[in-house]
Amino acid sequence: MVTVNDNYLKLPGNYLFAEIAKRVKAYKASNPDADIISLGIGDVTRPLPKACIAAMTEAVQEMGEATTFKGYGPEQGYPFLLEAIRKHNYLDHGIDIAADEIFVSDGAKSDCGNIQEIFGQESRVAITDPVYPVYLDTNVMAGRTGDLQADGHFAGVTYLPCTEENNFAPPLPKEKVDIIYLCSPNNPTGTALSRAELTKWVAYARDNEAIILFDAAYQAFITEDDVPHSVYEIPGAKDVAIEFRSFSKTAGFTGTRCGYTVIPSSVKGRAADGRLVHLRSLWERRHTTKFNGTAYIVQRGAAAIFTPEGEKQVRANIAYYQENARTILAGLKKVGLTAYGGINAPYIWLKTPVASWDFFDRLLQEANIVGTPGAGFGPCGENYFRLTAFGDKERTKEAMERIATRLHV
Amino acid sequence: MVTVNDNYLKLPGNYLFAEIAKRVKAYKASNPDADIISLGIGDVTRPLPKACIAAMTEAVQEMGEATTFKGYGPEQGYPFLLEAIRKHNYLDHGIDIAADEIFVSDGAKSDCGNIQEIFGQESRVAITDPVYPVYLDTNVMAGRTGDLQADGHFAGVTYLPCTEENNFAPPLPKEKVDIIYLCSPNNPTGTALSRAELTKWVAYARDNEAIILFDAAYQAFITEDDVPHSVYEIPGAKDVAIEFRSFSKTAGFTGTRCGYTVIPSSVKGRAADGRLVHLRSLWERRHTTKFNGTAYIVQRGAAAIFTPEGEKQVRANIAYYQENARTILAGLKKVGLTAYGGINAPYIWLKTPVASWDFFDRLLQEANIVGTPGAGFGPCGENYFRLTAFGDKERTKEAMERIATRLHV
């Protein structure tokens, strides 16, 4: 009989958001009039910038006329978008990336999930704890790990604990690792790696012939000068790092789907016979074989982000969320709760006086607010709780008032 | 040092369309005034149906207003599209498929490429020769094959030769296989499996506990009653078949990107410990972990295909291409060339009097027409040549006139 990929069976069910939904549903059933504010899911709420709407409206019309209709585009993305990304996100910041080192996709989640395919099965993977689950789950599915252990960690994976003690900056691993996932600004902790911290990692990768998979999906939220927007700001990174970026949180593309991956042609890995292989070529082979390009309409929308009006509108949206982050940080401080993040990221990582899930229940029952228990992102997330700044401004303020007046901390 | 996935290195470069482009470029350089007609790439040319344009225009506007903005949608697709697919493509044809057995994606290429991930590494794969390269290449990348042999076949794969002698209907394999890729109507041969042929395959899969991966991307072009549009028209298929469908060739979505995969909950595979596992659950895990849904705007466009106006407009587009297919078939017959396909598919599979690539050169030089050499789709494609019906009507007619007057066959 046909066999299945047994590695999939190592994964526990995706309980986090399902469990949240279940508890919220139960609470609503008993309290039908409760006015619940969600600061839980990391999804944007502001509409797309008008510049994107105008560009996509025009692109839709193009698709309706034979003379301007677009069929298959280049799998790597249209040159108009590749060039816009190259100029505005790299060249203008002093980083020399070629257009053919950029691969446009339907989002950073796909790319972060698929990238592991181009690496050898025996490569040792390092992830932070807590972590965005996609990095881990896709390596489990690929058979690059052992089984889930009693401590909540998978065997064969190097976990880098990020805690209050190390200011949520992952420590260098004790054993040699080959693939390092770094997300900065970080989901879920909302903290970001400083230039010095990231320099340490680039040095590690160079010294150990490892690869950094750098997820910069939240770079638009950076406010501090000392925090790099791109891994390529660090000298030497172009030999050892792959970068993922997204328009989801930058410009509200969570439901429109567009992101990209940068693989400099200088990044290499070793084949079994010892020769060096360009990772860029392997990714291109994957991208052209298993993907057929992002919708033309969507790419037109994404390119509009880089127009003067687009940039202005994007900055306004980011500022709106950043104000929410300040509201949340101030609100938590007021009631004596310790919180991290929120300065360079849309996430606030709050230290809970009780276990994550108990805090979830109390926040829901006492203040009718939904957030995300830190334990859902890994064992080191226990006693933490994630709140997001992606909500409505007035509702976010109200949530903080409720925390001040209704929550017993 | 980080190692690479060595299986990628087994793949020869993707030479087919690159080689075509190279030869066309060289010809153009020497003959700058040549008026070249392309009947080569399988890409549509008709604009999107007006119903899709209207729906997408509206959806774009929704994305620009806070009250109607859409962030993350369900990874599996919006219920409005799942229900439309279910009703119009299955229930109305007497096939009972549940909405949660349908997974909307960014196209059949992605799904056909990714589906192999959920199967065990040791599963034996059967593909036709000639074949759509995605089925083969993705299994090579996954390490489910040996090396490329001198005969043009990869070791460890079962090839099912489709030739004039068997009327391009793949023969049952001599050895036991686990995963069978069937594409009907077929790319590249343009032929289609009859009900009797497909029934034979479903019986094989049931008897041998194998899975059929049925690519129905071209089903909208079927004109003969005896050719199933869905594998599920065959009794018993719901236990052993996964179906891929696309809006690309149906409604011109090649540059808009939307397709879907159907996995009935009755389709199962075996885990290493012997227990039966629902393939639907494994695919759902993959889909929700490595994909974040198709753009809302695109899904609104796809749903419009199922409105009365949308259906009428889609039928008109298909009829336009079908007329091209008749033009090509008649044109080839007139000059005494033997051709297959074109009745239930947008592809014509022409028997070449010389080797595929020699015919390519003659057609380019003598008639200024570009097509695709059959040898590019597998060794059994040698001495065949693919022409597509996706061109402009007048240009297709002119191509046939050139073949009649300028080609020396």
Image (tube, coloured by chain):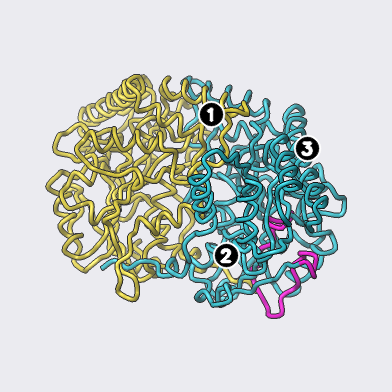
Chain colours: A yellow, B cyan
For the residue carrying disc 2, how many other residues have a C-alpha within 10 Å: few (<14), some (14-19), or many (20+)?
many
Residue type at mark 3 is: Ala
For the residue carrying disc 3, how many other residues have a C-alpha within 10 Å: few (<14), some (14-19), or many (20+)?
few
Residue B142 location in percent, x, y? 49, 66
Residue under label 1:
A32
Q: Is residue B281 visible?
A: yes
Q: Classify residue A108 by image quadrant.
A: top left
Task: Reply yes or no: does residue A271 show up in magenta.
Answer: no
SS for callout 1: loop
Region rendered in magenta? B164-189
Foreground mark, 2 or 3, reads: 3
Residue type at mark 1 is: Pro
Q: Chain of mark 3?
A: B
Left or right: A53 as drawn, with respect to B108: left
Residue B143 location in percent, x, y? 48, 70
Mark 1–mark 3 contact, CB under 8 Å? no
Residue A53 location in percent, x, y? 47, 22
Q: Classify residue A227 by image quadrant.
A: top left
Q: Residue at x 57, y 56 (%)?
A: B283
Residue type at mark 2 is: Leu
Residue under label 3:
B319
Foreground mark, 2 or 1, reads: 2
